[in-house]
Amino acid sequence: MPAVEMRGVTKRFGPLTANDGVNFAVERGEIHALLGENGAGKSTLMKVLYGLYQPDDGEILVDGRAVGFRSPADAIASGIGFVSQHFALVPRFTVAENVMLGHEGGARLNPRQMRAQVMIAAESLNMAIDPNALAGKLSVGEQQRVEILKALKRNCRVLIMDEPTAVLAPQDVEALFAVLRDLQKQGMSVIIITHKLNEVFAVSQRVTVLRLGKVVGEIATEATSPSALAELMVGRQTLAVERNTDHQRQEPVKLEVRDLKLADKRGGLRLRGLSLEVHGGEIVGIAGVAGNGQSELVSVLTGTAVPDSGEVLAHGQPYPLGQPKALPNLKIARIPEDRLKAVISDMSVADNLVLESLDGFTRLGHLGRQQIREHAERMIKDFQIKASPGDLVRTLSGGNIQKIILARSLGQQPEVVIAAQPTRGLDIGATEYVHHKLLEQKERGAAILLISEDLEEILQLSDRILVIFEGRIAGEMSAANADVQRIGALMTGAGG
Amino acid sequence: MAGLRIERAPSPVWVRSLIPVFSIFVTFLLVSVLIISAGASPLQAFYELLIAPLTKTSARADILMMATPLILTGVAVTVAFLGGYFNIGAEGQLFAGAIAGAWIGTLVTDLPSTAAIPLMLLGGFLAGMAWALLPALLKVYLSVDEVVTTLLLNSVMLFIVSYLLNGPWRDPVSGWPQSPTIALSGQFPVLIPRSRVHLGLLVALASAGVMWWVLARTRFGLELRAIGKNREGAQFLGIPVRSRVLMAALISGGIAGLAGVSEVGGIHYYLSSTLSNSFGYTGIIVATLGALTMPGAVLAALFLALINRGALSASRELGVPVYLADVIQATLLLVSLSFLLLNRYRIRIRR
Amino acid sequence: MELSIESILVLFGATLRIATPILLGALGETVIERAGILNLGIEGTLLLSSFTGFVAAQVTGSLWIGLLAAMLTGVVLCLLMGLLSVTLGVNQHVSGLGITMLATALALFWFRLQYGGGTTPPALDESFQPLQAFTGTPLEPVFSQHWLVYVALLLVPVTAWMLNRTSFGLRLRSVGENPEAADTAGVSVYRVRYEALIVGGILMGLGGAFLSLAQLGAFSHGIINGRGWVAIAIVIFGNWRPGRVLAGALLFSFVQALQLRLQASGIALPYELLLALPYLLTIVAIALVGRNVSAPAALLKPYRREG
């Protein structure tokens, strides 16, 4: 009998079906990988299992008994634990307080006993951790360990880990796997959500593959191969995107980044002297595991963060750091990571299309409503946005919102394009549209910096590939010589 | 399993357009209990509150007079709230304007009304702005919560008024804690003969009109609304968030200041601490009921003035305490706040 | 003003008396804010509970029933705040102010209904009397206080203990700091926030009752007169910690007491400006401390699970 089983689970968000009749089972004492691309519905499925989401259909069985989880408290009571990508720790609580929260064992707190219990639990897994430390001051790897301790403290028998390695440095990944194997030896089941094949083979015994919300395969890990899994996961061999393979670097450098350094709030260096160049008519892709400085680089280049040192040049001119207002005038187009932070969802499509470039639509502070409307109609046609000018942006699909952002930034004939995760969460049609538009800009002679966690996207579009690791460019190669194995090694800090 | 289910999607348009009707209906249902407890018939009371004032010319004029300060504070609060700046300080800013109006009003004895009144209005506007400046600066540059600072400054302003009226400005003639009467040329002309509807009403309507234009038709307005809806997004888009919010806070303070001048110049002709019947706080109700739109604020102010006027007759005719009006207004605020959620959520019946 | 030891002791006694209702309100507000809710309903809650306590005591002739009625009123109004801000997730600023407006209007409405529009405020035949234990001793001016004063002082360590040393306190703080984390840890965010509101409502009810049942033994419209707003300021000033909230309340009340004393001794001083001083000091303190340092991280944020 499986430790947990999900039968025919369906979960919808408005028009979107995130999980569609999913069957999923995990045996006792098994490490089970849940594999799929971004947006395949892995996290949603596990949030249903943990009671954070209520399924629209289907049932969940724990030890063969049907359960209905209304909240995480119910799931916890049934022995299910969840370590999310975004750690659920209270920064101002100590490690011990975080571990004991919701499970204090009595009305009165006994700090000494709490500390002792945490110490014992940590030692059983060979973890070194100070129960008195404030959670907000811990490293990411330590925070993750606290999360695992929390789950253990609640007598968890099935532990769900949501992309646990996405935030970890390579040396921490091996330590994490060691902890997971220890847990397995104690008879626990572990579900590891991932989109990385090497992790599936490194740690799991079984693997379930999700694509577009549906299960497309469930196999014993030793009975399959990376290429077989990759095909299941992606479901398409190559995208029909025409690529300029005989690209020659004739045009001058249009974007130059020199020795960028940026520390986070806790003083940890997120960018450690990052340098790169992008020529006109070239797409440079930045590949890397999430959390190696991509977000910070994007923040600097889109004008929302100011680096501690280093410089950025656009067509040889100093870049207006920290001044998003100045960027459109310098023909710098921005496609940010989080598209909902780049639009005003509660305003109309027409207003959103001009908010970045109001100079052209204002006379003495007075708005040209007619002009704005005409502009919107033109952009809607040019960029195939399925909306009318007066629609509120929040009523649109992700793909159409992204098209608004494309229209706003690419409609101004940019010289430099900063494209961060431009297709995250989009369906195939919208994804191909975005790719097409980026290639169009390249043909126009724009310099394009593409930052993406989707390695396939990087391989498809880039002329040159840079690999980012721990805030630096760890390696570079031309698309023609791109070798996935080498990129993988560089991304994880293993390559030289 | 059947049950109600709340979804994160706007309710249908017909539901949303009925929000004011729902809110008023539920409010009166709730308030009926209170009216019965006061020994009156709810239907009679509602007649006195909502219908009776509209049947008499003098009462209709009273409504316009009573709506004047509420339109101004409602417009003031709306401008600030739209930019995501929670100005709770309209009450203090109103008194700042009243002080300036009363002061300038005593100095303009030699000027004609055409110069005296604009000077008073300008002074009141600037004084309201000045009183709004500190919290706005603290908010914009130090991220200090404006709600608490503006609220505290309301109390400080009451002490200042009390100081002025008990000290340097105490009326030397009567000895009452009220300032000397302003010059004749500073007294607002009456718009409707044999009523107390004064120039302030035009000032209020003009303010609402101008601010409507500013918010809907200018770059400043568009950018301010963007900031109010998504501050982070506005920052990304290169909108100068700080200066826009600062400007909105100051305009808000200025318009609240005009409400003070209007009460001094149109009704009392002197400064007193009872000048405002919590008009600044009621402005928050006006702005919320008006759904943060200018026409909405004007309508809401007129509606609240109707209830205020109606409560006077209900009190006279039925013996229901006049504070019924305040209860209705507060209940209406809370009920409509709850109903406004239908703009963001919808209720579905699930089987 | 003569500066005798006697007069200083009287000043301290007055400070304690003035501080009590503000302290009780501020402690209640602290508990509620630590759970992530800014309750601007406090001003009206103090007023209405002061009123219901007074009416209940007068009608039943029992001060204890009055006290109970006041606490009940505080709880009911705080639960209304919970309905709006926790269950419905409405903007906390506006719903809090709305509750203050509603409670104020109800107090005035019922007061007029009960006592008409007379000018002399109604008074109780008998109110809570100061303790007599110190009568005749030199410390009488300081310690001859209503028992509620001592209760309020005692509630400072009790509240601190509850917040820091009980599992309820741990949960309460967790929903105020990071409700998502609390939820995933199996803590019911809604339930804990409601519980915090109930505790806070009891404290606010006590604060309102102290004025009408003990200190004044009477009720009038202006009985609260901004004390709720002062309490809000003191919570910030006190960094959301009961001990420092006490310090803030005492400081504020000392200035008040001093001002009253100066006024009584006929010194010509713009005493209103002195009265405004604590408010300005609080604004300065908020500006210096900055909002982000010690405020509960989830203050003002409604919590709603997605999906």
Image (cartoon, coloured by chain):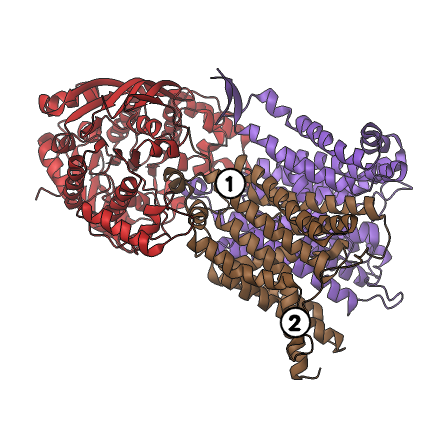
Chain colours: A red, B purple, C brown
Q: Is residue B229 visible?
A: yes
Q: Which amino acid type is marked by label 1?
A: Glu
Residue beneath the point at 30% across and 35% down: A82
Label 1: few (<14), some (14–19) or many (≥20) C-alpha neighbours in 10 Å: many
- Viewer-nearest of labels 2 and 1? 2
| Among the 4 quarters of the image, the one containing residue A158 | top left
Q: Which amino acid type is marked by label 2?
A: Ala
Residue beneath the point at 85% across and 60% down: B181
Q: Is residue A413 visible?
A: no
* Percent of width and height locating residue A75: 35, 31
* Percent of width and height locating residue B37: 79, 36
Q: Nearer the viewer, residue A266 or A396?
A: A266
| Among the 4 quarters of the image, the one containing residue B173 | bottom right
Q: Say left or right for C217 vs C152.
A: right
Q: Nearer the viewer, residue A175 or C7?
A: C7
Question: How far apart in space, not on screen, are marks 2 and 1 (Cα)?
Answer: 66 Å
Residue beneath the point at 37% across and 46% down: A104
* Percent of width and height locating residue B300: 71, 35
Residue C133: numbered disc: 2
| Tag 2 secondary structure | loop
- Judging from the image, mark 2 belongs to the subunit labelled C
Vertical position of residue B112 compared to residue A28: above or below: below
| Tag 1 secondary structure | helix
Query: Mark 2 and mark 1, same subunit?
Result: no
- Judging from the image, mark 1 belongs to the subunit labelled B
Vertical position of residue B88 compared to residue A232: above or below: below
Q: Nearer the viewer, residue C22 or B213?
A: C22
* Percent of width and height locating residue A15: 41, 19
| Among the 4 quarters of the image, the one containing residue B307 | top right
Vertical position of residue B227 compared to residue A78: above or below: below
Label 2: few (<14), some (14–19) or many (≥20) C-alpha neighbours in 10 Å: few
Q: Dot 1 corresponds to which residue?
A: B223
